Image (cartoon, rainbow, N blue to C red):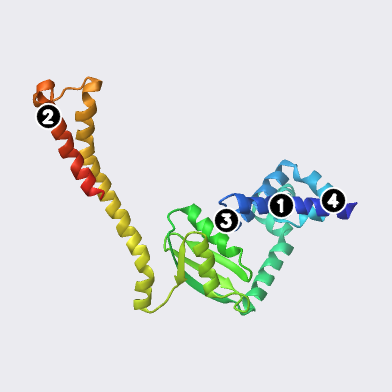
Amino acid sequence: MEYLNAFLCGGILCAIGQILIDKTNLTPARILIGYVTAGVLLGALGWYEPLVRWGGAGATVPLTGFGYNLAKGVHAAVLEDGWIGVLTGGLRAAAGGITAAILFSFLAALLKYMKQKFDVTGMTCGACVAHVEKAVKKLNGVQDVAVSLMTNSMQVTYDEKILNAAAIETAVANAGYGACPASRNPETREAAASPRRQSLEELNALKHRLIWSFVFLIPLFYISMGHMLGLPLPAFLTGTENLLSFALTQLLLTIPILIINS
C-alpha cells in the first residue's frame, strides 16, 4: 500500500505541473520555483507533514518535498541555535539534495551538447517568451532553453545527434514567431535583424497613421455629432440654408482619413 500511495502522490504532483505547463503561460522555471515555495509554505504551516505520512517518497522526492525539507530544517535549527538557524537550517537539511544537484549539473556539463544562439522575431511580451520556450522545450533532444525578450534572442542547448537547428526554427515558426541562428558575421546578423526592423518600422508607421487620423477624426466627430449633444457649431454649419456647407465640411475631413489609411 505504501508504494501505491507514493505512486499516487507523486503522480498527482507531476500531473499538476504538466497542467500548468500546458494550460498556462508559466515557464517551467517559474513552475519549479512555485513548487519549492509551496513546499516551504505548506511545511511551515504544518500542512505538508500529513501528505508526507500518506505519500512517503511520493511527497518527499518532488520539489515540494525539497521545500518541505528546507522549512523543516529551518524550524529545527531555530529551536536549536536561535535566529541564526534561519540561515543555516535549510542548507543543513537539504545538503544532500543541493550536493547532488551540483554534482549532476557538473556531469551534465561534461557531456557534449550543442549550445546555439538564435535571433527570434515577433515577440512583444512575456507571454510570447513563454510560448517560444514551451514550443522548443517540447522537442526531443532539447536540454535547456533561455529566451530573452530584451535582446529578442534564444539560447538552446540540445543533442546534435537527435535535433538540429532547422527543427528548432520550424518549432518556433509553428508557434507563430520567427527564428534563425545568430551569426558573428555582421552581414548575416544584419540580414537576420531585418524582419525585426521591418516590424518596428511598420509599428511606427501605424502609430503615425493613428495620430493623424485622430487629428481629422475629432473635428469630424464634433461637427457631425456635436449638435446631438447640444454642443455649439459655427454659424456657417447651422440651419437648413447651410446644409451644403455642413456636408462638404464633413467630406473634406473624411477624405484625409481615407488617404492616410489607404
Q: What is the x, y in percent for residue 228?
A: 24, 22
Amino acid type at image mark 4 = Asn
The Cα atoms of the two marked residues, 4 and 2, are separated by 84 Å
The answer to the question of whether label 4 and label 1 lie on touching residues, with beta carbons closer than 8 A, is no
Q: Nearer the viewer, mark 4 or mark 1?
A: 1
- Which residue is painted at 31% across and 57% down in the image? 202
Dot label at residue 244: 2
**Disc 4 or 2, which lies upstream in sequence?**
4
The answer to the question of whether label 4 and label 2 lie on touching residues, with beta carbons closer than 8 A, is no
Give the vertical position of 98 relative to 162 (above or below): above
- Which residue is painted at 79% across and 46% down in the image? 51
The Cα atoms of the two marked residues, 4 and 3, are separated by 29 Å
**Disc 2 or 1, which lies upstream in sequence?**
1
Q: Nearer the viewer, mark 2 or mark 3?
A: 2
Q: Which quadrant of the structure image shows residue 212? A: top left
Report the residue marked by disc 4: 5
The answer to the question of whether label 3 and label 1 lie on touching residues, with beta carbons closer than 8 A, is no
Q: Is residue 94 left or right of residue 113?
A: right
**Disc 4 or 1, which lies upstream in sequence?**
4
**Disc 3 or 1, which lies upstream in sequence?**
1
Q: Is residue 211 left or right of residue 16?
A: left
Amino acid type at image mark 1 = Ala
The Cα atoms of the two marked residues, 4 and 1, are separated by 15 Å
